[in-house]
Amino acid sequence: MLLIDFGNTRVKWARWREGQLLAPLAQAYDDPALAADLEALSVAEQPGLRVLRYASVTAPHHVQFVLRPLRAAGFECWRAGPPRSDGLLQLAYQPLDDLGVDRWLSLRALRARGAGSFVLACAGTALTIDVVDAEGRHLGGTIAPSVDRAREALLARAPHLAKSAAEVELLAQSTASAVHSGAVLGAVALIEKLHRHAEARCAQPLPLYLSGGGADLLRHWLQSTVQTVEHLVLEGLAGLRPGDSLAPAPIQ
């Protein structure tokens, strides 16, 4: 089975074999190699095993660009969502489909790994932070700009602050470092604030998980003990059963 995660800026995919993700890859939508890689992918899977599951938070034209050659190669395409509650995870959002499908699948993946109560921070295009208690109840979460988006928003309003890349410093001694440090440390402070609040809410220590392309940058500055996890959306896709919000992909 082929699994595809259509993120805001990148598409990620992997094959699923005997309970394992095989050779996960990620590419930007504007990567000139993407079309050739899709062609290679379309002929790699054996006939009769061409089943594809995907989740998307991006524009439909990105999805159709990727799916078109795969569908032509005989892949049976299934879309995940909308999010729903079940025995594995009960969602706090009302309406349920207001929760991003990527967040839903990531939380389900951690629950399926055996995690009880936890905090998950995902540093992607946005920084999302979610809390789940020991009974599998999603208590809610927060969405904030990622480090890059926070810097871009500031520089869009104050372009004179734009400088070359700099290191993170608690007490910066240049404008470039001050701007970059403010974005990084602001994200770190939000994660730690939500982590402390979640532990008080649940009246127990909670593991903190960190995922996404910006995880390594934030992990260095977090004072809390943190576990880095990868490919949660793909794992969540693999864990869905036929009745778990899987529907045939629309043809456009």
Image (tube, rainbow, N blue to C red):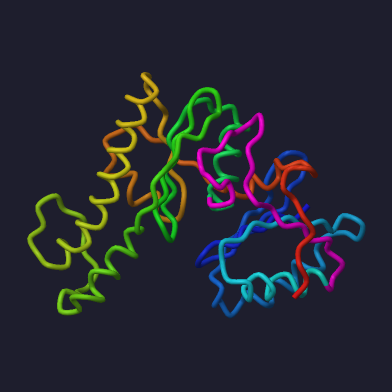
* In the image: residue 169, left or right of residue 244: left
Of the pair 85 and 159, the residue shown nearer to us: 85
Looking at the image, which is closer to me, 36 or 111? 111
Count of numbered labels shown in the rendering = 0
* Residue found farthest to the top: 203
Looking at the image, which is closer to me, 25 or 121? Answer: 121
Looking at the rendered image, the quarter that the C terminus falls into is bottom right
Please, which residue is most extreme toward the front here? 95
Q: Position of residue 239 (x, y in %)?
A: 70, 40
Residue drawn at 62 percent across, 47 percent down: 83
Q: Nearer the viewer, residue 142 or 1?
A: 142
Residue 49 appears at what percent x and percent y? 87, 55
Identify whether 113 is placed above or below 234.
Answer: above
- x and y percent of residue 167 in the render? 21, 59
Which of the 4 image quadrants contains residue 180? bottom left
Instruction: Decide if residue 144 is in sight here.
Output: yes
Q: Give x and y (percent) for residue 210.
A: 43, 42
> On screen, 69 above or below 207?
below
Quarter-of-image position of residue 141: top left
* Residue at position x 84%, y 73% in the image: 72
Magenta-drawn stretch contains 79: yes
Any part of residue 227 in sight: no
Magenta residues, start to end: 72-98
Position of residue 181 in the picture relative to residue 62 (left or right) = left
Whether residue 61 is situated above or below residue 9 in the rendered picture: below
Name the residue at the right extreme.
48
Q: Residue at x 32, y 42 (%)?
A: 191
* Residue 95 highlighted magenta (yes or no): yes
Which residue is at 58% across, 32% downward? 111
